[in-house]
Image (cartoon, rainbow, N blue to C red):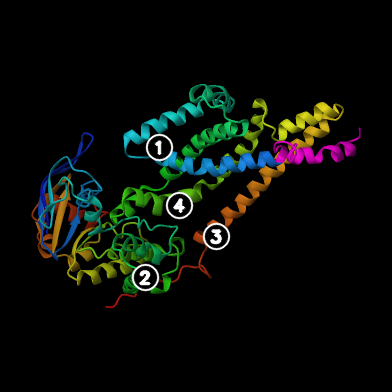
């Protein structure tokens, strides 16, 4: 079988798995899993991050513990826990997709929490002091003053984590989730003679996804910084004259 | 209006306020001066509870500010605070900096809040910069916006923490002119500053602090011409001729 024949035979399988005759798989499943993980992990990460900087110990301590446990564990372990351990407690066998999604969301949320914490804590103390001095509450200060600034600073780290998430979906392979790596391996088993080409295509696919996301984020970052860092036209400082009624 | 009773504050083992007692009348303009590390900034920061105190009482308008059940946000919203480092919110325009708190805390409509804030910006001579971000403003302009922001909550008390110390020399005048203008309004003001000319001209009273104690209370005339405490005499002669060793 030549390379072109292989592509011709398997491209639909690579893109969507056995769908519509079987479960959705392939690249489509990878994209679905990655986006669902991002969409769910971001708000959870924000929440956990806010808990990490909370002045209330009762909120801060359990979340800190969770973050440290998750950060000290390989994702593979988290996947195994979700796959074997969780059903033994709940008594419900969750599907592979849900299992993987759960593992990814918990894992990434813990990392995002640290990014959020760092983002908030890197802001000058004067920002929260100024907001509190106006009479804004702790949460109001967080929401209106600290988070909008922190999120902007965090953008590069957030994108980094999102890119990781896309790549981490490939671990679904080990619990038999038919995402794109799993499909590629199946194709390789069937074709047998073209492993280099098949895995190159797989690598290229991940690269395009991750690179595309990075570029998108880069442009977003530039647009955001233009808004707050633009200089006035003819930006030489003008002589300052007080315009105060005498 | 404002009473300090036997206020003590420690940072660890270092005592930054020692038995401070003082009474400030409504409408009074009090300048606090003294060498750095003397507790001037700490003193005014205790008044809106940015700094906790370990013993003593602070009473504002007959109300103990550390009383149980007191709404600290409501307390702070009636004390305007202007910082040495301006602390404008960089993700918001000058106008949005001013409208943020009134919109949230005074229940104004956007239109009302903007009209009021524009009037305040006009008063500090910056109506034409209403839509500029902090990064587009000079230091003096930023500090004038910060003053307008503090005024937006219509506080009866204004605190200034070295408002001109972070400014280039040529911008000091424009900020002092704004503060001088406010002094005519009957607001109660506590100003920590090294600008002795300003103190002489605007203050009703001067407090001189060193090592956490108020060593001298006097009218500007008495203080600058006939200081009683030896430490105050030393301080005044030092700032008048900084290059002459004692």
Give the CA separation, mark 1 to mark 2: 36 Å
User: Sequence-wise, which precedes: disc 3 or disc 1?
Assistant: 1
Q: Badge 4: how crowded within 10 Å, few (<14), some, or many (20+)? A: many
A70, above or below B132, in the image: above
**Protein chain holding label 4:** A
For disc 2, the marked residue is: B114
B67 to the left or right of A65: left
Give the CA separation, mark 3 to mark 1: 31 Å
B2, above or below B52, in the image: below
A102 to the left or right of B108: right
User: Sequence-wise, which precedes: disc 4 or disc 3?
Assistant: 4
Q: Nearer the viewer, residue A1 or A96?
A: A96
Give the CA separation, mark 4 to mark 1: 18 Å
Q: Which residues are magenta?
A: A1-27
Give the CA separation, mark 4 to mark 3: 14 Å
Q: Position of residue B214 (x, y in %)?
A: 13, 50
Q: Nearer the viewer, residue B178 or A41?
A: A41
For disc 1, the marked residue is: A52
B108, above or below B57, in the image: below
Q: Which mark is residue A226?
A: 3
């Amino acid at each position: 079988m030549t390379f072109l024949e292989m592509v011709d035979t398997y491209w639909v399988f690579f893109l969507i798995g056995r769908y519509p005759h079987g479960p959705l798989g392939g690249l489509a499943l990878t994209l679905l899993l990655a986006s669902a993980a991002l969409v769910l992990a971001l708000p959870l990460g924000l929440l956990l991050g806010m808990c990490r900087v909370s002045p209330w110990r009762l909120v801060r301590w359990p979340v800190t513990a969770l973050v440290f446990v998750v950060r000290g564990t390989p994702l593979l372990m988290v996947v195994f826990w979700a796959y074997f351990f969780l059903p033994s407690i709940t008594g419900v066998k969750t599907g592979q997709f849900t299992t993987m999604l759960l593992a990814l969301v918990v894992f990434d949320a813990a990392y995002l929490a640290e990014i959020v914490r760092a983002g908030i804590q890197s802001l000058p103390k004067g920002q929260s002091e100024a907001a509190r001095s106006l009479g804004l509450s702790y949460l109001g200060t967080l929401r209106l003053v600290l988070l909008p600034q922190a999120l902007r600073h965090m953008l590069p780290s957030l994108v980094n984590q999102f890119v990781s998430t896309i790549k981490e979906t490939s671990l679904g392979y080990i619990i038999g989730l038919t995402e794109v790596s799993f499909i590629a391996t199946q194709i390789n088993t069937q074709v047998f003679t073209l492993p280099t080409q098949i895995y190159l295509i797989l690598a290229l696919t991940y690269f395009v996804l991750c690179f595309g996301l990075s570029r998108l984020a880069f442009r977003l970052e530039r647009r955001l910084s233009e808004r707050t860092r633009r200089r006035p036209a003819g930006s030489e400082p003008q002589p300052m004259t007080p315009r105060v009624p005498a | 209006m404002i009473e300090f009773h036997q206020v003590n504050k420690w940072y660890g083992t270092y005592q930054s306020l020692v038995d401070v007692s003082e009474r400030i009348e409504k409408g009074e303009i009090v300048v606090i001066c003294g060498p750095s590390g003397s507790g001037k900034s700490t003193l005014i920061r205790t008044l809106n509870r940015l700094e906790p105190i370990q013993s003593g009482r602070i009473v504002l308008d007959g109300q103990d500010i550390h009383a149980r059940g007191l709404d600290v946000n409501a307390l702070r919203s009636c004390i305007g605070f202007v910082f040495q480092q301006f602390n404008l919110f960089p993700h918001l325009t000058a106008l949005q900096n001013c409208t943020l708190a009134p919109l949230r805390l005074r229940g104004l409509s956007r239109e009302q809040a903007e009209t009021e804030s524009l009037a305040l910006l006009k008063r500090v001579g910056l109506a034409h910069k209403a839509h500029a971000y902090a990064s587009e403003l000079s230091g003096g302009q930023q500090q004038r916006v910060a003053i307008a922001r503090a005024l937006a909550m219509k506080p009866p008390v204004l605190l200034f923490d070295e408002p001109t110390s972070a400014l280039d020399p040529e911008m000091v005048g424009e900020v002092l002119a704004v503060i001088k203008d406010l002094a005519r309004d009957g607001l109660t003001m506590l100003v920590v500053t090294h600008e002795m000319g300003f103190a002489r001209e605007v203050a009703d009273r001067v407090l001189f602090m060193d090592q956490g104690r108020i060593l001298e209370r006097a009218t500007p005339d008495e203080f600058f011409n006939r200081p009683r405490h030896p430490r105050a005499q030393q301080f005044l002669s030092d700032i008048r001729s900084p290059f002459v060793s004692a």
